[in-house]
Amino acid sequence: MEIKKILVANRGEIALRIMRTAQKMGIKTVAVYSDADRKAPHVRFADEAVHLGNSPSSESYLNMDKIMGAAIQTKVQAIHPGYGFLSENAVFAQLVADNGITFIGPKPHAIKVMGNKLAAKEAVKAYNIPMVPGIEESITDISLAQTVSEEIGFPILIKASAGGGGKGMRVVQEPSELPEQMERAISEAKAAFGDGAVFLEKYIESPRHIEIQILADNYGNMVHLFERECSIQRRHQKVVEEAPSAILTPQIRAAMGEAAIQVAKACDYVGAGTVEFLLDRDKNFYFLEMNTRLQVEHPVTELITGMDLVEQQIKIARNEKLGFSQQDLSIEGHALEVRVYAEDPLDNFLPSMGTLETYKRPEGKGIRLDDGFEEGMEIPIFYDPMLAKLITYGKDRAEAIQLMIRAISEYKIKGISTTLAFGKFVCEHQAFTSGEFDTHFVKNFYTPELLQQQYAEERKIAAMVGLKLFLEYKDKLKVPGSENSNWPLKRTQ
Ligand code: ADP
């Protein structure tokens, strides 16, 4: 099937990232944009751009009819949904197909099954995949929940079946807390996802979040591209990711890879997808969920495998066979990613909105920056506050970490607070460098005071460097235009 033009139904860094690969493949691109994104780089980069409407997502990037209208108007053969927005919406994938356009992603059936945590558990049941102990159906009856929880053993986790983005989860430490937490979880799930179904899972005490990237073509060929470690999280959401994981043995890696392929088979998966697992202290792994799209953190996999995942997605959408098998794939080097969110790590990671007064990118060998903003731009309040992804690649983990620390210090952002300083904090922390950490890194090791100390240290070093330079050059320092004056002396007069 020929794809000459692709509409990218997204914005920001991911829209640009997808368009770059399309351009490399000789495919034309169409951007869509809202009022807030009129001047965004992804709009300028594309060959054509279609205005969708007002800034709120419901009137722009989440509006299926407007996006379909833009696709029909610009006569594209395919739509790439990116991540977020409509990327995991089975109704949209079907609508695209019904209009004779290729949806770059899996079939609606796979999106639907994996979009619901309970349906996903049900689908993989027959495939011998290790799952977190718990119940695999929706529960509303409190006394039944009590019996089940006693069987599973506290602490337990109440999860919303339709949940996503780390939302809709409640940890219950003791039996007495259960009734209230159940009620809250159900009403929250209803409000947030329009679906009140919740279920119970064993709360794994010290888990690591490790996920496997898979690729599947339309001919039944499936491979995995190893793991990504995503345990550094705040609010159950990832902030720092890496590949490979510091702790997987080749045996566990192979077993998780095989399990991920089985999960993908369970829903007839086609395209690029990610199977998420939790790994407990004893390195037992449990299936968590499958994300049926390109992940934010996909670049770390690209760097260690040398594979362009968007290119693979497009090739699969063109009905091409995978050009390699599992034996052809191997891990080379180590990659690290820090998500740059417009958030204040000194203030509970709350969104920090404003204008990018200064925006200077770090550059150099081993540094990749996926971003979608420029100096002078305002960060719109309407969308996800992620500005960019800073990725480093080294021959080993220590090198990637060192490079990240350097890249963060060279990345200058002023006008808003970001998670960059937090990324540096992580990279310098012994728990991270040693590889001995879990999803509770923030809770266990991070306080705003520690970050403030880091700032104070940096200021001190900067002041000392300044003083050293001053002492070295003080005889040569002159105020421009007043040739004979030594300005520090003048100023004190
Ligand atoms: P979402 O779809 O909202 O992202 P996930 O099921 O993928 O939810 O879980 C997100 C994060 O929540 C995990 O990475 C992990 O940190 C935590 N989590 C989920 N399930 C459990 C569990 N059973 N025990 C401990 N932590 C969990």
Image (spheres, rainbow, N blue to C red):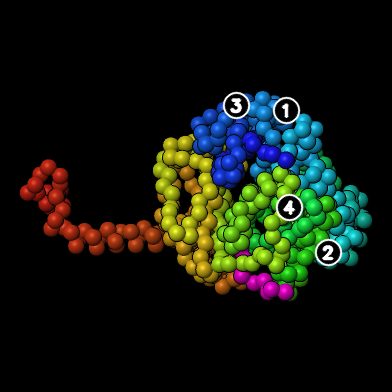
Q: Residues within 10 Å of mark 2 (few under 14, many from 20)?
A: some
Above or below, 451 relative to 168? below
In-image side of 2 versus 55 (left or right): right
Q: Earlier in the sequence, mark 2 or mark 1?
A: 1
Q: Earlier in the sequence, mark 2 or mark 4?
A: 2
**Residue named by callout 1:** 65
For this rendering, which residue is in front, 416 or 101? 101
Q: Earlier in the sequence, mark 1 or mark 3?
A: 3
User: Marks 3 and 4, Cα distance to the nearest angstrom?
Assistant: 35 Å
Q: Disc 3 residue type?
A: His
**Residue named by callout 2:** 129
Q: Quadrant of the N terminus?
A: top right
In-image side of 117 versus 11 (left or right): right
**Residue named by callout 4:** 321
Q: Which residue does the image show at 83% across and 52% down from the upper left?
A: 267
Residue range (magenta): 239-251
Q: Disc 2 residue type?
A: Ile
Q: Disc 4 residue type?
A: Lys
Q: Which picture quadrant has residue 323? A: bottom right
**Residue named by callout 3:** 51
Q: Residues within 10 Å of mark 1 (few under 14, many from 20)?
A: some
Q: Secondary structure at mark 1?
A: helix
| CB of mark 1 near ligand 1 (< 8 Å) | no
User: Marks 1 and 4, Cα distance to the nearest angstrom?
Assistant: 32 Å
Q: Position of residue 19 (x, y in %)?
A: 58, 41
For this rendering, which residue is in front, 322 or 481? 322
